Every structure is written in structure tokens, then in C-alpha cells.
Amino acid sequence: MTTEIYLDGNATTAVLPAAIAAAADAMGQRYGNPSSSHGTGLKAKVLLDQTRACALRLLGVGDGRLMFNSGATEGIQTAVLSALVALRERRERGDAIGNLLVYGATEHKAVPESLAHWNRLLGLNLTLQKLPVDQDGAHDLALLRQWAPQAALVCTMAANNETGIVTNLAAIEVLLAETGSAAYWLVDCVQALGKLDLDLASTRIDYAPFSGHKLYAPKGIGMLYVRAGAPFTPLIMGGGQEGGLRSGTENMAGIAALGAVLSALERGDTFRSHHQLASFRARLADSLRAALPGVVFNHPFDQSLPTTLNFSVPGLSSRELMDVFDAAQVRVSSGSACSAAKAAPSYVLDAMQAPLWRSAGAIRMSFGPLADQATIEDACRRIERCGAALRASCLIPSERTAAPHDGLLQLGVEGACSWLVLDAASRSCIVIDPLPDMTSRIESYVRCQNYQVQAIVCTSPGIDRSILISALGRHVDSHAATDAYGWPASGHAIELGAQTLFSVADGAARHYLLGTAVDAALPPQAVRFAFSARPAVEALRALTCAHTLLCPTRDEHNQFCVGMAAPATPATPAALQLDRAALDAFLQEHPDTELIDVREPYEFAATSTPGTAGRGARSVPLSRLAEHASEWLRGAQQGTPTPLVFFCRSGNRSLKAAQLLRRLGHAQAYSLSGGLALAPLAHAA
Ligand code: PLP
């Protein structure tokens, strides 16, 4: 069984074994309340004091204050509240405070959200001013210089979580001094801890929040540095813990664990040097360049943390990249928040004026300073495998022609879809309703499989096909005479291997019927598929039969296809799902069950140990489901339904597949709940 390689260190990290031991000790042995004056409490107090002393030395806190809290989001709140309360008091005294709350355009959302929240709650009505960054992610210092005299608070993170870009804090410090700015200065140091040298008291930084879980301590523990003389207002009042700065009984397990991490940092014997980390990044970058042609790194390495790579690959969405890496058990994150349908662009890369394809397709690969050479080498091998899997699936250019596919392929985007009818024997295909967004996908698919496109037909008239025709080059006859729907002027049917496509006029719309022709016609019983812009079409009823599948070119609800017969009563999701134990029992009872992996072929290919529960699993991605559904239904209609269990990574896609089959009348279709993530089938009996 392949182990996972975790390359998402900027999101969170595993806990250092010494930190786990320290937390266990704090919970099991030194469990006292540090405020208690008896011996048990005193032991806890010693632990608390030792940890604080270590943090003070390591961060160069000097005369400043350092409190433990729940993490950086709390630290940011506290810092913003402290600065804004002081500003309000100064304003009430009649002092000029400036009217701008300036924050870098690439700050973590916790910063602008807290600014807006406390600005409103405190009734300050200062102006939130986003400071732009350049294409390399560096703050616009000329603009900051201009704004500095009116700035009440300036927030500039030490290093960015998406790109690792390091802020030139020294230059900002000079600028604030030169302009005589009285602004408070908040520097989010979350991503800097353990990766950049910090000597806080030697700077004019007023507030610096930290988070334990970004550096091998558990979630729920953090620190806030406050410069000596900087105003402070507690966020949480109560028993006066942390010298009254932050009440509430201390999270001693978290503090002990953080203490173990901080002392490892201080000793310098646990974490890799900057140089070693930079060599790991270079190795990963080389392997990405080799595996994913055209990969673009979205940040200058020499101005970034050595532990972060943020990249985009032309023609690939972040969803596809995430999926293929995840299949190879390499955990990365998409640089942007993405939904299943379409990735939302990353606000960080947008701020850096990256083009949309890079901003919406970005992947972040990040590791912590505990990374080791063997893991990096293993990651590189898996990256290579991901590249090969994507090439074999025609998602990235390949010198070799991929093995041709047969049957139907659905290519969808945001509720619309194009269909490709493929014939491997003659290496030819027909495109139905080409979507502009799918042009490059169709082109690379056709080129990579070396198909000849016989026709590009549409269900409505006047659709512009010229962009696709020119993209396809020699793979299509660009001079063929067609009508307004792209249908060849020369014939009433298009033959594709053993199948024939017929066109049906329906007012201004066209529908297309596919099947094996009998005497140059297509009797209803022979129609396997009907293509239409509409999911329910009366005009087709007399021309098709109960086992015809209607493939709509609008598919907002991810139905894939619908049957011409009345849909079966929908089963509840619960009735369709088998957990791991139920699957074992089901397989015992139904040894003829087919296990179907509905992940995309590149995910299937990138999986080192495809889950098979001791039997062969077939790869039928959702994009090919209609084709296979038609076969499975034929078996079911002949009275011999093969039991089907679909699986995918998380259980979402497989549930959709099982729902489709049930809707179409197959009574024995199930989904593995939780997917491979929760129930790795390779362990099956
Ligand atoms: N600031 C940055 C730069 C971060 O990366 C994060 C974590 O995602 C935070 C703040 C929030 O930290 P926490 O999870 O400790 O609240």
C-alpha cells in the first residue's frame, strides 16, 4: 500500500513526535492548572514559563509581550482590536490618527475581515485601503509611501501562504520611518515561523501573530507578539491568565507541544537549513517541468520561502491537477477555492495580475522544514507518474498517439456539455454541440488520438464552429459544405464505423439519433442514443425506444443522460450507499459484482495500487458513463442485471453514477460511501 506524501504544509502540518510526547506528558503527568498554587499546578506553571522563555529568545521579543492563544486568527483579531481601540481613544482626545487601514492585497482573509469587522463594531469608519502588489507579489512601496502619512494601521504579512512570497519588511520599516508615519504595524508571521529569521524587538513591528499548526504543533495553539509600548486591549476577559492579556485556562497540551517545536528550532538539530529546503524545491520544480510541459511557476523563487511552489499548467484545471495528484497520493492544494464545476480564481494570483488560466488553475505544493530527501525523491517519481497519466489521457501533449477510445465521450463545463462520438477502428469521430470553452480540450483529444473529425454538428442553427475547425487543422475537412447546423450538405446520414448518425428536425432545433442502421434507416429499436439540447423531447418519443438514452447538451443537474422510458422511483442516497463493511458482505453475496472506478482515466492511471478489493476494477469515468450505462441496461433489460458498485475518491462521483443507473431502472447499482479516501479497497479481503 502506497503511503501518502503530504505536500500541503502551508495549510497545516503533522505534529512533531516530540511535540506529541510533550502534549501527552502535559495531559497525563503535568496536567495541573498553572494558576493553582499547589505542587501539581506549579509543575504546569514551570512548563508554561519554560515555553514562553524559549519563545521570547527565539523570536527576539525583547521588552515586548508574548501571549499564548488559540492561533493566528485570534492573534489577528486581538491585534486589530488593540490598534483600533487605541486609534479611537486618540481620535476622541483630538489627536490626528490618519484615516486609512492599509492592508496588502495578498493578506490572508483573516486580516481584511477583522479590519472590516472591528472598524464597524467600534464605529471608527476608517477607510480600508488595499495595497496592490506587482506581478512578483511585492507590495507597491511607492503607493505605500504616498499613503503612509494618512495610515492609521498597516498590515503586511511576512510571507504569503499561497505563494510563499516574502515581504520586504525592512523596506517598509524604512518607508514608515521616512514618512514619519504614526501608523501601527501588524505583520502576520504565520508562514515565517521556522522559515525566516525573526528578531521582532529590533523592528518597529507592533503586532505579530503566529500559529502552531503551520509548524508541527497541534491546531488550536498560537502566539501573539506585542511590541513594548504598543497599545493592547484584551479580546478575552476573565480570570486574568497570561498576565491579564488573554484570559481562560491555558491550553497546556498545545503549549507543551509548541514548546517542543520551539526548542527544536532553537537547538537547530531538527529542521533542515534554508539551503537544503531550497534544493528540495529545485528538485520538485525540475520534476514538475519534466512531467508537465509548459508548467509556469507563479512566483519568483528567489523572493519566496524555499518550501512553497505555486504553479499552473496550460490546458489543465486545478481540479484535474488536484485529482491526479491525489490519486498518486500526493496531497497538494489548489491555489484557489474551487468548486466541482469550475475553479474560482485565486485572489492572491489575481492581485499579482496573473492571467485567468493561471489564477484559476493554480496548485500549491508546500512542505515543512522537516522534509527529507527520500520523500522528495518519492514525490518526484509520483509527479512523473501523474505526467504520464495525463499524457495517456490526452490532457497534455504527448509525442505518442494515445490508445484510441470507442463510443461516447461527454465533455462538460458549467452545466453545458459537448458530446464526441468516437470510432476507434476508423479513427474517426463526430463532435456534437462544441462549447467554446472546450475547444482546446477537443482539439488536444482529437490530435492526441489522431482522429479525423467527420462532422461538427449543433442542435441549434448558426453556432460558430470556425474556431474549432481552425484549431483542428488537418483533422477536419474545413471545406466540407454544411447547413446552418453543421450537417453535411451531401447526405441524410453520417456513417461512423458500424454506427450511423441521423438528424431530426424539430422546429428550429435539431436532434440527432445514433444507432446501427437497418436498410439505411434507423428503426426505433436500433436507436441507442439521442442527442438534444433538451432533456425531455416529445418529438423523439416515436422515433426511439425504451432503452434509448437521451444525451442532453445542457446538463445543469449532472444527470449525464436520461432514459426515454419513465424514470424509476428515485432511491434515497442512503439506500444506494455501501460502506466498507457492507461492501464486503455484498461481494460475498454477489460474487459477480462489477467494481467500477468512476474517476477520470488519469486518476486511475496515477493510482499506484488501484483499489480492487481483491478483484478487477474497471475504469469507467463519468465522462464515459452514458456509453457504459447503455450496455449495463441492456443486461438488466434481458433480466440479468450485473450488480454494480461504483467508487471514486470521496464517494460523490460514484453516488451520481449509482443514481443515474437507478434512475434508468438498474436495481442493483450502489456507491462506496466515503470513497477510496475512507475505504481503501486495496486492503479488502
Ligand atoms: N495567516 C496566514 C498567512 C495563514 O496561512 C493562516 C492559516 O491559514 C492564518 C493566518 C490563520 O491561522 P490559524 O489557522 O492559526 O487561525
Image: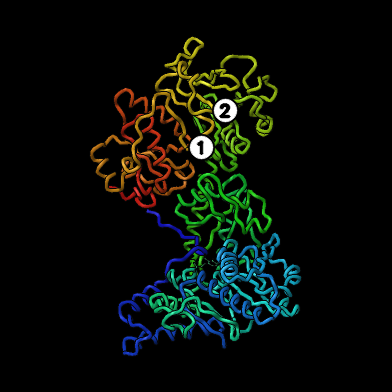
Relative to 663, is 357 above or below? Answer: below
Mark 1, mark 2: which one is toward the viewer? Answer: 1
Q: Is residue 296 left or right of residue 640?
A: right
Examine the image and state in which quarter residue 638 appears. Answer: top left
Q: Residue 556: which disc?
A: 1
Residue depicted at x 55% and y 27%: 427
Q: How many residues crowd around disc 2 within 10 Å: few (fewer than 14), some, or many (20 or more)?
A: many
Q: Position of residue 603 (x, y in %)?
A: 47, 45
Q: Is residue 529 left or right of residue 206?
A: left
Relative to 345, is 19 above or below? Answer: below
- Residue 278 appears in the picture as rendered: no
Name the amino acid type tagged 1.
Glu
Q: Is residue 337 left or right of residue 571?
A: right
Examine the image and state in which quarter residue 79 appears. Answer: bottom right
Q: Residue 432: which disc?
A: 2
Relative to 286, is 411 above or below? Answer: above
Number of labels in the image equals 2
Examine the image and state in which quarter residue 465 appears. Answer: top right
Name the amino acid type tagged 2.
Ile
**Camera-side residue of 70 and 669:** 70
Q: CA distance from mark 1 to mark 2?
A: 17 Å
